[in-house]
Image (cartoon, rainbow, N blue to C red):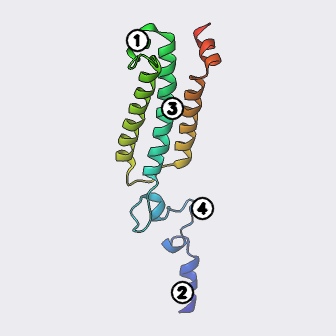
């Protein structure tokens, strides 16, 4: 009887010995967020990616407001600040809309947080570059 228990423990097909390093199926808490007591990472990933989207939107809107007079006039919500008021307002709306949509999409799921972080960081970097005057001047050929 003791031999049967030890052989069952060493059997790779036994679910209790599933090892992701050997290509065995993932435990349930990694595959889905359906194990009670464990939180899914989807809402956090949604917030991180939405921040990247909002940052990129800020950069794109700032570039557009600087490059084209039509966009400059469209973004002019409050005269004392000029187009900056509409640029920031538009970026905040995009950020909140992205956060709302992604949190609804990923609310109870686990997503690849590493990939989300990389994409969000790249968006943040692009958004920052598009608000940096020497880089924008280079893009516009000034």
Residue 93 lies in quadrant: top left
Asked whether the beta carbons under mark 1 and mark 3 sit within 8 Å of each other, the answer is no
Q: Secondary structure at mark 3?
A: helix
Q: CA distance from mark 3 to mark 2?
A: 59 Å
In percent of the image, x 47 and y 15: which residue is there?
65
Q: Residue furthest bottom?
A: 1
Which tag, 1 or 2, sits closer to the chain's start? Answer: 2
Image coordinates of residue 37 in percent, x first then y, are 42, 68
- Label 3: how many residues lie within 10 Å, few (<14), some (14-19) or many (20+)? many
Frontmost residue, 8 versus 32: 32
Q: Tell me the residue that label 1 is attached to.
A: 73
Quarter containing the C terminus? top right
Q: Looking at the image, is 64 positioned above or below residue 94?
A: above
Q: Tell me the residue that label 4 is attached to.
A: 22
Q: CA distance from mark 1 to mark 2?
A: 79 Å
Q: Looking at the image, is 106 positioned above or below residue 140?
A: below
Q: Tell me the residue that label 3 is attached to.
A: 55
Q: Secondary structure at mark 4?
A: helix
Please indicate whether residue 73 sits to the left or right of residue 23 in the image: left
* Circle 3 or circle 2, nearest the eye: 3
* Circle 2 or circle 4, nearest the eye: 4
- Label 2: how many residues lie within 10 Å, few (<14), some (14-19) or many (20+)? few
- Label 1: how many residues lie within 10 Å, few (<14), some (14-19) or many (20+)? few
Which tag, 2 or 4, sits closer to the chain's start? Answer: 2
Residue 20 lies in quadrant: bottom right
Asked whether the beta carbons under mark 3 and mark 2 sit within 8 Å of each other, the answer is no
């Amino acid at each position: 009887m003791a031999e049967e228990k030890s052989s069952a423990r060493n059997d790779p097909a036994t679910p209790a010995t599933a090892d992701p390093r050997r290509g065995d199926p993932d435990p349930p808490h990694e595959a889905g967020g359906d194990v009670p007591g464990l939180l899914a990472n989807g809402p956090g990933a949604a917030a991180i990616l939405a921040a990247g989207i909002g940052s990129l939107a800020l950069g794109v809107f700032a570039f557009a407001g600087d490059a084209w007079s039509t966009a400059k006039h469209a973004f002019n919500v409050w005269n004392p600040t000029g187009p900056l008021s509409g640029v920031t307002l538009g970026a905040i709306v995009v950020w909140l809309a992205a956060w709302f949509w992604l949190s609804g999409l990923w609310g109870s799921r686990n997503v690849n947080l590493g990939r989300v972080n990389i994409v969000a960081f790249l968006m943040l970097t692009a958004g920052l570059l598009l608000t940096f005057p020497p880089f924008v001047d280079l893009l516009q050929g000034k």
